[in-house]
Image (spheres, helix red, strand yellow):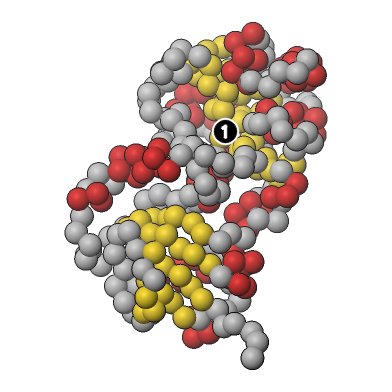
Amino acid sequence: MADRRSSSSSAAPPLFGLVLAGGRSTRMGRDKAALTYADGTPQLERAMRLLAPHVARAFVSVRSDQADDPVRARFAQIRDREANLGPIAGLLAAQAQHPEVAWLVLACDLPLLDESTLAHLLESRAPERAATAYRSSHDGEPEPLCAIYEPASREALAAYVAAGRQCPRRFLTESDTLLLDEPNPRALDNVNTPQEYGSVMSLMNPQSSAAPRQQPSGEVKRLTVQYYALLREQAGRREEALVSGARTPRELYAELSRRYPFSLGPEALRVAINSEFGDWSTPLADGDAVVFIPPVAGG
C-alpha cells in the first residue's frame, strides 16, 4: 500500500501533525490526555500513534506549565503562545512555528477515532483550499479538531483571533473549507465529562457494567489509582482512572512503572485497596480504588 503522505498532489505543502493536549480538563476533573481505555494506553499516546504514520513530523500542543508532565514530555511539543484561547491557541502556535506546512490537527480526546476516518480525510485533502474537515454527523457543522489546515489559512486565522474571535468551528464555516461526510458517525465523539467517559467505556466493553466483582484473570477492569508523596511527583498527578488487565496490585504497579519514572520498587511501598491495606498479590476487581503509599520521612 502506498504511503498516504504522498497520496495528495505532488504540489501539496508538506503535512505535519498536531495533537491538541493543552486543555485544562475542567469538566472531566482529571487530565483527559492521561485517560485510558481497553488496552491501558493513555489517550494522548493513542492519538499520536494514529497520527504519526501519516505526517512528516508530529507534535503535541501544550501549555507551558504542562511541558514536563510525564504523559506529554515524551513527545515533541509546541507550546501555546497565547493564553485562554482554547484549542485555537495550539494551531496558532504551530502555524507560527512552521508557517510553510499544512497541519493535520487532532484533539487528544477522540477515543473512537479510527484509521478509516483518518485515511478518508487524508485521501480527500484539498491543498488548494484553506482547510479540509468533516461535517459533524450531529449538527452538520464543521469538526475543527480532526481537520487539515493548509498554509493558506494561517493569515486568515491570525486575523480572526486578532478580531477577538476564538471559535474554530466558525472559522472553518467562514473559510474556504472542503467539508466531508463522516464515514463513521461516532468517530469524532469527544469525551469531556466523567459521564461521557463512562459511556465510551461501556461501548468499548459492554459487559463490564454487568460483570461480577470477582473477575477472571487478565480481564480488563476499571480502576482508580491514587499516588502520594514521591509517587505523586513522579507521576505528575494525584489520581487517575484507567482500564487495566492487571490481576494484582503488583502487576498494576509494574504496568504504571512503564509509563512513569517511578524510582521505588514494590518492596518500598504499601498498597491499599478500597481504603484497606492489602497484599501485593490480592486479586483486583472492576471498580477497585488502589493507593500506592511510599515511606513517610520523619520521626
Please name the residue that numbered disc 1 is placed on. 106
Q: Is residue 238 above or below residue 103?
A: below
- Residue 210's spot in the image, x, y percent? 20, 50
Residue under the image location 25 percent in, 44 percent down: 206
Residue under the image location 70 percent in, 29 percent down: 85
Of residues 95 and 69, the one drawn nearer to the viewer in this rendering? 69
Residue under the image location 57 percent in, 33 percent down: 106
Query: Is 141 left, or right, of 12 in this rendering?
Result: left
Q: Amino acid at mark 1?
A: Leu
Q: Is residue 49 above or below residue 68?
A: above
On the question of residue 173 being in view, the answer is yes
- Residue 86's spot in the image, x, y percent? 66, 31
* Kind of element beneath mark 1: strand
The image quadrant of residue 194 is top left
Q: Is residue 38 above or below residue 82?
A: below
Residue under the image location 68 percent in, 22 percent down: 166
Residue furthest to the front: 299
